[in-house]
Image: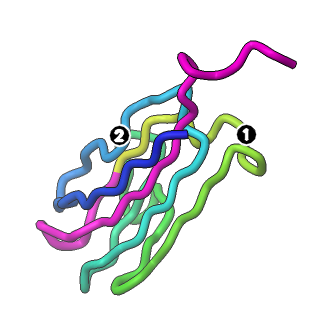
């Protein structure tokens, strides 16, 4: 398993925060800003078409065991105010190093 931890600046215009990754098994998103933001699968994510991450700690957790392939999808985000900080933690399988043993 590979783990990636980063922050991203989310603006008042929708943009991609995670690209499609068939090997991703876990996603944790935390809104670190003082502004609400919204995440979703569509590039047209908005306050009426997205999952709301409330200001100062709104969180979304997805894992492949419970959400199946949802963790592998591309995610987009938009914030009420530009330059809003989003924390991202993702985990992915390293398919190249997986054992072929059953």
Residue at left offset 58%, top offset 49%: 26
Mark 2 highlights which residue? 43
Above or below residue 43? Residue 23 is above
Viewed as shown, does residue 42 lie left or right of 83? right
Residue nearest the observer in this picture, 12 or 73: 73
Viewed as shown, does residue 90 lie left or right of 72? left
Q: Residues within 10 Å of mark 2 (few under 14, many from 20)?
A: some
Secondary structure at badge 1 equals helix
Q: Residue furthest left?
A: 83
Q: Are marks 2 and 1 in contact (CB under 8 Å)?
A: no
Q: Which mark is residue 68?
A: 1
First to last magenta residue range? 77-102
Residue nearest the observer in this picture, 32 or 1: 1
Residue 76: image location, x then y, percent: 36, 47
- Magenta includes 69? no
Secondary structure at badge 2 equals loop
Residue at left offset 41%, top offset 71%: 30
Above or below residue 86? Residue 57 is below
Q: Nearer the viewer, mark 2 or mark 1?
A: 1
């Amino acid at each position: 398993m590979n783990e990636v931890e980063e922050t991203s600046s989310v603006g008042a215009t929708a943009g991609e925060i995670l690209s499609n990754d068939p090997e991703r098994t876990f996603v944790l998103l935390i809104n670190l800003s003082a502004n609400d933001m919204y995440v979703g699968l569509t590039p047209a994510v908005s306050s009426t078409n997205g999952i709301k991450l409330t200001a100062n700690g709104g969180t979304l957790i997805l894992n492949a065991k419970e959400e199946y392939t949802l963790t592998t999808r591309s995610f987009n985000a938009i914030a009420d105010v530009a330059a809003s900080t989003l924390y991202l933690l993702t985990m992915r399988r390293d398919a190249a190093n997986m054992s072929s043993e059953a």
